[in-house]
Image: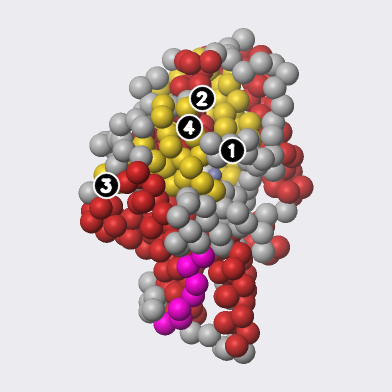
Amino acid sequence: MLILGIESSCDETAAAVLDEKGTIRANVVNSQIAVHEKFGGVVPEIASRHHLKNILPVVNRSLADAGAGLGDIGLVAATRGPGLVGALLVGYSFARALAFGRNIPFVGVDHLKAHLLSVFLGPEPHPRFPFTALLVSGGHTALFLVRSPVESSLLGTTVDDAAGEAFDKVAKILGLGYPGGPVISREAEKGDPAAIAFPRPLADSGDFNFSFSGLKTAVITEFGKMGGKVNRADFCASFQEAVADVLSAKAVRAAGEHGGRLVAAGGVAANPRLREKLAQECFHAGIELFLPPLSLCTDNGAMIAHAGLHLFRTEGETPPDADVYSRSSFKAD
Ligand code: KG4
Ligand code: ZN
């Protein structure tokens, strides 16, 4: 039996085919970056229209790459939320109708839980449960205790912006385009991370919450003080260092208090400096670190198929009247 996973929560139309052992047979991601770039961020209606245009070709490509036909698919999984509702509805409705037409089961998957498990799709070693997970994406920044493939609890979250959002906003201020993460990390490679002393918000707060809006304000103020004439590489390296510092310090402390195993997931987990810092700090603290390959950090259908398989095995099908949702329902204990 093969599992088809479909993701359409933001600006990636993605489909993947997985086998029951969790091996990726195909993983196709169609990014709309070029479409949204000129607006400096994702425009929801345009994203929905592009998902509609792309969904069938992307699913067909994934089946062709897997050397499979629809008759080989025994389970369909699609992202149910959180995300842009209009975007979610395209992938979710497509997947549910496909399962209905083929008379096979369908599961609606939580995008964040899928990110948390994405490390299992990469090469071994894989973490044992429970583990602490730092989820850092465009819309979310949070620490979770992951007890099993279907049970996670929130340890802390951002009180304002997400880390990815901060990267995107800073890139916009510097005129570097969208999305900000990859371009800032490239610029930062040539810069001095100690050039500007940006604040480390909530670094010593004692809890597991994050805040990035103060850092964003500091970036705007600094940019203004320099009259817009900044050394881009130093500016990016200093900003990235501030983000990586707070993320890694809290994540490593959380893992130390909750079993000694840490996973990082989500688009910002592709950041080379964050990966390096986590590795250094985990080594010093005696914590085992597990990082997904770069291609599985950003949005993809493989993580949806994988989380969908676990969900189906424990809870069965998603009821036919289940709706998509825009916001995460996780609450801290
Ligand atoms: O997980 P993801 O693909 O989508 C969401 O679920 O949000 O994350 C996208 C975010 C964007 O904000 C992007 O700027 C950021 O991940 N990102 C990075 C890097 N690559 C992507 N941030 C920092 N460094 C990177 N190399
Ligand atoms: Zn995501």
Label ID, residue 152: 4
Q: Which residue is mark 1?
A: 331
The answer to whether residue 114 is seen in the rendering is no
Q: Which residue is mark 3?
A: 287
Which stretch did the figure color magenta?
A: 195-201
Q: CA distance from mark 4 to mark 3?
A: 20 Å
Please give the name of the residue rendered at 43% of the width and 27% of the height, measured from the top-left corner. Answer: 149
Disc 3 crowd rating (10 Å Cα; few below 14, some 14-19, many 20+) is some
Q: Nearer the viewer, residue 55 or 211?
A: 211
Label ID, residue 308: 2
- Does dot 4 land on a helix, a strand or a loop? strand
**Please, is residue 309 above or below residue 61 in the view?**
above
Tag 1: amino acid: Lys
* 15 to the left or right of 125: right
Disc 1 crowd rating (10 Å Cα; few below 14, some 14-19, many 20+) is few
Looking at the rendered image, the disc whose residue lies closer to the viewer, 1 or 4, is 1
